[in-house]
Image (cartoon, rainbow, N blue to C red):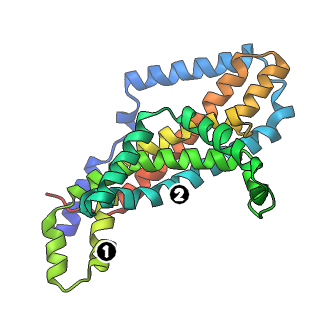
Amino acid sequence: MSEESTIEATALTQLPSGRGFFKPHRLVLMAVAAAILFCAIWFMRWDWLPDYAGRLAHGVGVTLLMLVGTCLLGFLLAVPIGLVQVAGPWPLKLLAKGFCTVIRGTPLLLQLWLLYYGLGSLFPQFPAIRQSFLWPLLREAWPYGVAALTISFAAYEGEVMRGAFAGVPAGELEAARAYGMSRWKVFRRIWLPRAVHRALPTLNGETVLQLKSTPLVATITVIDVYAVVSKIRQVTYLTYEPLLLLALIYLCLTALLVLAFRYFENKIPTRSA
């Protein structure tokens, strides 16, 4: 038998079979989940759902936009924050370390309120700002929510990227320099990809936590899915049904995030020991 055939046969034997999936504890969990779903559908009121389906969809869209936008912007800030803590001059190291310490050591809700109720209340006092092209944005609530979530994500991911950059073996970087690569090419081709690969599992968890932090923007009048559900509770005088629906929405979004990160983790080749 050839080597490729042996590898394929080994891979097939390692795949989980259908019989192995339906184990007793999994059957019990599926039965409990089915019972809960049946009770929720049969004994609770859901007649309000069609009337608010459009608002809920809009709220989910706002939540996803806040999540994706702040994660991308935060990660772009986290890369230089982590890099300067490993290879930067000491003033930048001190500045980046202080930024991460302050942001990680204070509540996100406090940061959000300081930006919106603090900084946001100062802007209208300056005529130059009120007459500038930025005023249509600065008078809205969502830019302050994006700024607070981005800063928070950058601080946490900055520490993650610091550890990821420091964890890349120095021999790989030295070998790349020995081949005549410039410092920028070493960073772009070797250091950054290896660091991102090492940080992916932690980045997955931080992104899920970022999703769970997005409801805080409802406190500054941003209409996300949490704000929509809160309005439904006030109008319908229902407590459990809207909250259960909200929990289901966040569970589905979290599952999609986990699957997406696992897909990217599996796509990145790794060398077996």
- Determine whether the residue tagged by mark 2 lies in a helix, strand or loop: helix
On the rendered structure, is 120 left or right of 101?
right
Which quadrant would the N terminus be assigned to in this image?
A: bottom left
Seen from the viewer's position, the closer of residues 96 and 239 is 96
On the rendered structure, is 89 left or right of 249?
left
Q: Going 28% across and 54% down the picture, which residue do you hit?
A: 164
Q: Residues within 10 Å of mark 2 (few under 14, many from 20)?
A: some
Q: Going 81% across and 20% down the picture, which residue do you hit?
A: 234
Tell me how many marks there are: 2
Q: Is residue 142 above or below residue 266?
A: above
Mark 2 vs mark 1: in front? 2
Seen from the viewer's position, the closer of residues 140 and 33 is 140
Relative image position of residue 135 (x, y in whole percent): 77, 57
Q: Residues within 10 Å of mark 1 (few under 14, many from 20)?
A: few
Q: Is residue 67 above or below residue 174?
A: above
Relative image position of residue 271 (x, y in whole percent): 20, 62
- Marks 2 and 1 sit apart, C-alpha to C-alpha, by 21 Å
Res. 73 mark: 2
Q: Going 66% across and 30% down the picture, which residue do you hit?
A: 246
Q: Is residue 97 above or below residue 27?
A: below
Mark 2 or 1, nearer chain start: 2
Tell me the residue that label 1 is attached to.
189
Q: From this viewpoint, is residue 198 visible?
A: no
Relative image position of residue 141 (x, y in whole percent): 72, 44
Relative image position of residue 111 (x, y in whole percent): 55, 38
**Residue sticking out furthest to the top:** 43
Q: From this viewpoint, is residue 209 visible?
A: yes
On the rendered structure, is 1 left or right of 93?
left
Amino acid on which disc 2 is placed: Leu
Looking at the image, do the residues carrying marks 2 and 1 touch, with CB atoms under 8 Å apart? no
